[in-house]
Amino acid sequence: MIKNTEMVDFKVFHDKWGHLVPVEENQTIPFEIRRVYYIFGVEQGVRRGFHSHKELRQALICVHGEVKILVKTTEEEETVLLNDPSKALLIGPMVWREMYDFSADAVLLVLASEHYDEEDYIRDYAAYEREAGKWLQEMQETKKTCWKQLASTSVRIPFSTVERMHQSIRREMTDKFLEVYDKGWFVSGEEVRLFEEEFAAANGARYAVGTGNGLDALYLAMRALGIGAGDEVLVPSNTFIATALAVSYTGAVPVLVDPDPDTYTMGEAGLAESVTSRTKAVVPVHLYGQTAQMDAVMEFARRHHLFVIEDCAQAHGALYKGKNAGTFGDAGCFSFYPGKNLGALGDGGIVITNDQSLAEKIRSLGNYGSTQKYEHTCQGINSRLDELQAAFLRIKLRRLEQYQDERNEIAQKYLTRIHNEKICLPKIGKERTHVWHIFAVMCKERDRLRAYLNELGIDTVCHYPIAIAAQQAYKTCGLKLTDFAAYSAAHELSLPLYIGMTEEETDAVIRAVNAFT
């Protein structure tokens, strides 16, 4: 295809009732759709179009019949035959187009990124050549400038770092270390008790139980709810493997379900297709910093009498309809891995719940199955949040809202200033507050984009390039590789976002992404 054009294949759903093709803005169509129109009844021999747009982007779909589209720039041209309603021709700015050879039954659907504006049209080809030449030169200069500014420096932009955040609280953290050190009490002490109380209160929960890490938090919650051999647990197909491992450790079977393709989080559609008589629980993962569609998840769980264990490892402080992640289901499980929005200086985790009995079971299971020293009522494990990490986390918890504001400011710059039709930006679900643990974009040329950014000194990460079902660890378990998990594994790329990220660094990432061709 010529520059600024692309063919897109839509997913087609087949059943006994026929075919269905979903077309979604910022997903299958890489822009917001502000205008829709269709062309039909074009007589034989009529040729139309003969224009370019300065800013407008379009997707052309021949939903019936066929039509030929000539697209060209000042450097190249191509003729595309549209005759398949499951395909779209994407046309970006400054591409001349002509439409001809309409079949008698042709219906051409056009999805546009902006409302009609005559000022955006270039209808004279000589004027188009002049404007396109200037535009192409400006794009090339922008790219050259970007490369010069970034490639000339040895300073890299990391994907993530805690250095700058920790520098600002260094004195407070070292003072707290010495305080705990001098007390000589390092496990299950006052700092843990206070942090549990403070974290529960900050999230609107009654109880919190510290654990050794986020995986243990999930496992202990499931164990305490009685999940075990013979049970099935519904898990998003595009999450980190820890969610599935927690299920496997109980002896139950993880069942992978596709998420909502707009938000990458769990919704009812994928659940309804996967529930069986053996299903015992559902684990919505609040992925990348955004909650799942919890109204739908909770209604589904009530209808099928399922436990709900929320995986909140990436969603500290995220809200759904004003309510904190982790407080909808039976339990909410968090990780304090150093790179999280609320991270320790080592590993750690916590479970929050409003069920006192459940909290006591989790605490016992994480303490060798004991509530009284040397008395063990069940076979538990050793998984406790230590004093030092709790003390550090108390300091950071007081600043979490400030940190969230800073992350959101960076994310909003990305959302409003990245304009590249090859890049699909994240979409925020209705009535949700995103905390931007990860700024995940989708790009069909993900690997080329990543190599390009790396060459410019910009570090990125793929979350997660090998789907759970494709992992060697689950090779013999018969897990289904779902459509979205495969798509996300091949197309997701996470851009740098961290506390202390400078305006210059943010601008550099935006320039580089916009210059990608």
Image (cartoon, rainbow, N blue to C red):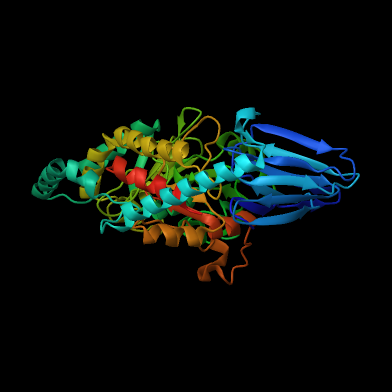
The x, y position of residue 49, in whole percent, is 74, 40
The image quadrant of residue 189 is top left
> Foreground residue, 411 or 119?
119
Name which residue lies at 55% across and 35% down.
429
The x, y position of residue 12, in whole percent, is 75, 52
| Residue 142 in the figure: left or right of residue 284 | left
> Foreground residue, 438 or 351?
438
The x, y position of residue 434, in whole percent, is 45, 37
Q: Residue furthest left?
A: 182
The x, y position of residue 480, in whole percent, is 63, 62
> Foreground residue, 268 or 19?
19
> Foreground residue, 116 or 412?
116
| Residue 213 in the figure: left or right of residue 229 | left
The quarter in which the N terminus is drawn is: bottom right
Residue 204 to residue 351: above or below: above
Q: Count of labels shown? A: 0
Observer able to see residue 334:
no
